[in-house]
Amino acid sequence: MRPLPTLPLRACTTGRWEPLLGAVAAVLVVSALVAAFHLPPLGWLAGLGYTAVGGAVLTVALRRTGAPLGPAGRVTLTRAALIAGVTALVAAAFLGDVPTAALVALAALALTLDAADGYVARRTRTASSFGARFDMETDAYLVLVLSVHVSTLLGPWVLAIGAMRYAFGAAALVAPWLGGPLPDRYTRKVVAATQGVVLVTVSTEILPAPAATAATALALAALLWSFGRDVLLLRRVRRSSPPAARRRSRAAS
């Protein structure tokens, strides 16, 4: 993803209390689900584990970059709290039935707010590379959790949808040229958004099995095409770069 320029921030503070408030909100969401639906320990442990790890990573990232979370980041933090509930429900589903309506409602709300944080960033002129990365990683984790859930309905092949982003990141550690900047493309955003929509729809279990399988397979095919196109573009950029730059890239790997 191409980094966004960090713009002057308005009405933003650099308070480091925001990750803590996000963690408290996530704990409240998980606690409400445990109380309402008597989730097994695996459920609330997964939800709280995600909250602890996510909160720690966010706190460290804020300290290292010195970036404020900003209004849009707070929307993303709200989404992260909802995703803690999704995590708890998906984990609990391995030990028994969970309320599908609650899982779908939380996931759908998190997806809906995905459009809101970008709008808020533009309206408040607080778009930043940090906010874009926070949003992207939150999206990727939600898709991963939903793919785990849908894999129990359709088969383990669905896990490829959630694993794709992380596999690409791991590959960039071995081949740094894969971590190069990419042009901002609308089709990439559409394909990424489609993954969550399809996975939530299939999670409702209202589609016949053949239709659910076909929709999920098409979403995976679109994702493979999108990542494949980006890899080919990055490869062309690498080949057209000066030899010295290629040597530095190999040395970095």
Image (cartoon, grey):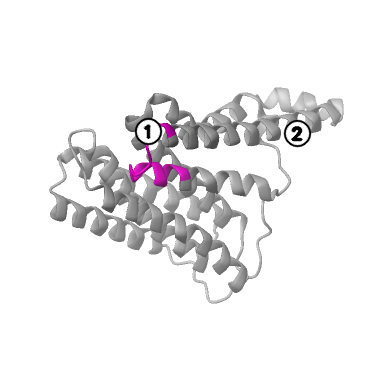
Q: The magenta stretch spans which residues?
A: 198-210
Q: In this view, does 144 lie to the left or right of 194?
A: left
Q: Name the residue under label 2.
A: 233
Q: Circle 2 — which element?
A: helix
Residue at disc 1, secondary structure: helix
Quick check: 163 above or below 196?
Answer: above
Magenta-drawn stretch, dominant element (helix, strand or loop):
helix
At 26% across and 45% down in the image, what residue appears? 88
Verify CB contact (< 8 Å) between mark 1 and mark 2: no
What residue is shown at x 44% (from left), y 30% (from top)? 158
Name the kind of residue labelled 1 in the image.
Answer: Ala
Judge left or right: residue 87 versus residue 111.
left
Placement of the N terminus among the 4 image quadrants: top right
| Drawn side of residue 129 relative to residue 232, left or right | left
Q: Which quadrant holds the C terminus?
A: top right
Camera-nearest residue between 128 and 68 = 128
Which badge, 1 or 2, comes first in the chain's sequence?
1
- The image shows a total of numbered marks equal to 2
Mark 1 packing: few (<14 Cα in 10 Å), some, or many (20+)? few
**Nearest the camera: 221 or 231?**
221
Residue 233 can be seen, yes or no: yes
Residue 96 placement (x, y as % from top left): 17, 36
Where is residue 246 drawn, in percent x and y? 79, 26
Q: Position of residue 250 (x, y in %)?
A: 72, 23
Residue that numbered label 1 is attached to:
209
